[in-house]
């Protein structure tokens, strides 16, 4: 199973803009990301699965795209 | 309504826009908060387009490092108030609209009065405390909010508080319920920003304002668009109301007024010590220590060691009573105690030793099992 992750802003500076995972769900993904990238520990980001922001622990499926979006404050 | 104003000729002849669209623009009242990188293009295009009343809030003066991206200003403007310089340029650009300047800082004390008199708000600020304040005030006042923010080479645009496809009104807290820690996200000063970026994002905000007022096209209601200057890729996601956020927003005008957004967002967590359960038990038995439960009254489990209860919501009014040198804070999960520690740090500085229980009282439960 392969799930594509697109990261933005400061998160992408840590993870790279595109990575792959086979995590079965969002909370497994968050855990995996923190292990692979310890710098993410205290970073805030919203998660969108297939272009929809979600707070739930959705199951991930082959072909899903997960976006990691941090808040920006600059103006 | 005259149709012979040569100034708007290209709007009149524009299909789906026409005289009606121009009339709506001329009747609109739009408040632009922040006259910096985002604010400049927003103001220029909204003034040029004939937005009837433009309010501008900004308390800063023009500085040399602004000119790389804040294109309303010239080198001669350095040291002068942005709102004054901006108003002068915009009146030359379009003397037929009304421009109202507010050379003040937006605070929870004045936000309500400022925003209430306008149809919609454009957030062109550069910090999280203003952004959360504006969001909450717009939710309470039920005003559409056109959001824009930038980071290095990327920008975000969204339209909040407008009924969307799902018919519910979404706001910034549906995306990011609470502000990030103060040192988590660098601002433009620290991170740098490509000068053209706020120009483009600001123009997208201006475009959303015009679309919303005139009813053309599809507004980014309840959606967040991220745009990259390096690739021109844009990525739009739907925001959802899966998680309720109303409890994070002040209940009414009075509560908004009492909320100190600068404390919520801008304190530093530098110098705050995090304690694990063993260290926590050791410290609370030391002399000269004040142990504070910052949870609201009645939250369980109750602490079975001596402590005082000062809920986070009432912390700032109690600061003068904290005479001890060591202050140890705890809450349920460690989040509120960290926030409280930040407030104390901001108030007392290095004169006191401030620590908090990491992962909260829950962590103590786990070890006693």
Image: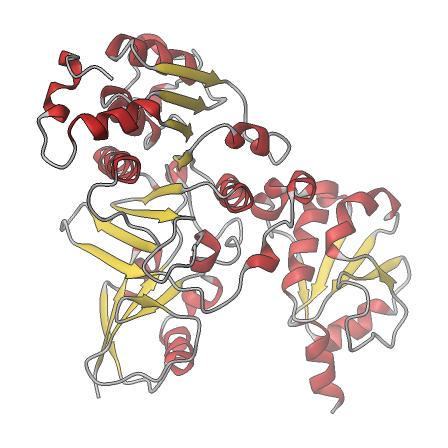
Residue that sits furthest to the bottom in the current view:
B369
Q: Is residue A24 left or right of residue B338?
A: left
Q: Position of residue B21 (x, y in %)?
A: 22, 30
Residue B70 visible somewhere in the drawing:
no
Q: Position of residue B70 (x, y in %)?
A: 30, 24
Residue B217, compared with residue B281, is above or below; it is: above
Q: Is residue B35 left or right of residue B273?
A: left
Quadrant of the image occupied by residue B82: top left
Where's the N terminus of chain B, which quadrant? Answer: top left
Residue A64 visible somewhere in the drawing:
yes
Q: Position of residue B127 (x, y in %)?
A: 47, 40
Quadrant of the image occupied by residue B283: bottom right
Q: Is residue B63 left or right of residue A64?
A: right
Q: Is residue B134 left or right of residue B218?
A: right
Q: Residue at x 57, y 58 (%)?
A: B246
Quadrant of the image occupied by residue B168: bottom left
Where's the C terminus of chain B, which quadrant? Answer: bottom right
Residue B328, compared with residue B213, is above or below; it is: below
Q: Residue at x 39, y 19 (%)?
A: B63
Residue B107, compared with residue A21, is above or below; it is: above
Q: Residue at x 77, y 58 (%)?
A: B311
Q: Residue at x 45, y 52 (%)?
A: B171
How was the colour assigned to the protein in this rendering? secondary structure
Task: Decide which of A65, B303 is in the foreground and name it.
Answer: A65
Task: Decide which of B143, B303 is in the foreground and name it.
Answer: B143
Q: Position of residue B130 (x, y in %)?
A: 51, 39
Task: Decide which of B135, B21 is in the foreground and name it.
Answer: B21
């Amino acid at each position: 199973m392969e799930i594509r992750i697109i990261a933005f802003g400061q998160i992408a500076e840590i993870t790279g803009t595109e990575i792959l995972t086979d995590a079965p769900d969002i909370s497994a993904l968050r855990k995996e990301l923190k292990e692979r990238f310890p710098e993410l520990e205290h970073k805030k980001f919203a998660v969108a699965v297939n272009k929809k922001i979600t707070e739930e622990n959705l199951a991930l499926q082959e072909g899903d795209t997960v976006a990691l979006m941090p808040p920006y404050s600059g103006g | 309504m005259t149709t012979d104003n040569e100034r708007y000729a290209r709007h009149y002849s524009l299909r789906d826009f026409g005289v009606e669209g121009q009339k709506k623009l001329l009747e609109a009242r739009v408040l632009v908060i922040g006259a910096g990188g985002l604010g400049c293009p927003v103001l220029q295009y909204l003034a040029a387009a004939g937005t009837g009343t433009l309010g501008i809030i900004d308390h800063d003066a023009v500085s040399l490092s602004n000119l790389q991206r804040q294109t309303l200003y010239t080198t001669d403007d350095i040291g002068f108030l942005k709102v004054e310089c901006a108003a002068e340029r915009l009146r030359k650009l379009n003397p037929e609209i009304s421009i109202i300047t507010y050379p003040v800082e937006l605070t929870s004390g004045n936000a309500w009065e400022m925003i209430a008199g306008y149809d919609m708000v454009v957030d062109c600020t550069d910090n999280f405390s203003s952004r959360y304040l504006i969001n909450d005030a717009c939710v309470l006042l039920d005003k559409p909010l056109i959001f824009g923010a930038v980071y290095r080479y990327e920008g975000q645009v969204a339209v909040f508080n407008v009924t969307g496809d799902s018919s519910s009104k979404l706001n910034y807290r549906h995306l990011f319920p609470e502000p990030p820690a103060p040192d988590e996200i660098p601002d433009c000063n620290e991170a740098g920003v490509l000068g053209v970026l706020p120009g483009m994002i600001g123009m997208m905000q201006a475009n959303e304002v015009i679309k919303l007022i005139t009813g053309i096209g599809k507004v980014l209601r309840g959606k967040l668009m991220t745009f990259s200057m390096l690739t021109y890729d844009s990525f739009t996601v739907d925001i959802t109301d899966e998680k309720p956020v109303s409890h994070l927003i002040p209940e009414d005008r009075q509560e908004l007024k009492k909320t100190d957004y600068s404390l919520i967002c801008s304190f530093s967590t530098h110098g705050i010590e995090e304690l694990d359960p063993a260290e926590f038990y050791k410290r609370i038995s030391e002399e000269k220590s004040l142990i504070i439960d910052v949870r609201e009254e009645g939250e369980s489990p109750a602490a079975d060691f001596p402590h005082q209860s000062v809920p986070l919501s009432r912390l700032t009014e109690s600061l003068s009573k904290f005479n001890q040198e060591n202050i140890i804070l705890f809450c349920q999960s460690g989040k509120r105690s960290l926030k409280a520690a930040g407030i104390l740090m901001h108030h007392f500085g290095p004169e006191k030793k401030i620590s908090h229980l990491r992962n909260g009282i829950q962590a103590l439960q786990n070890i006693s099992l």
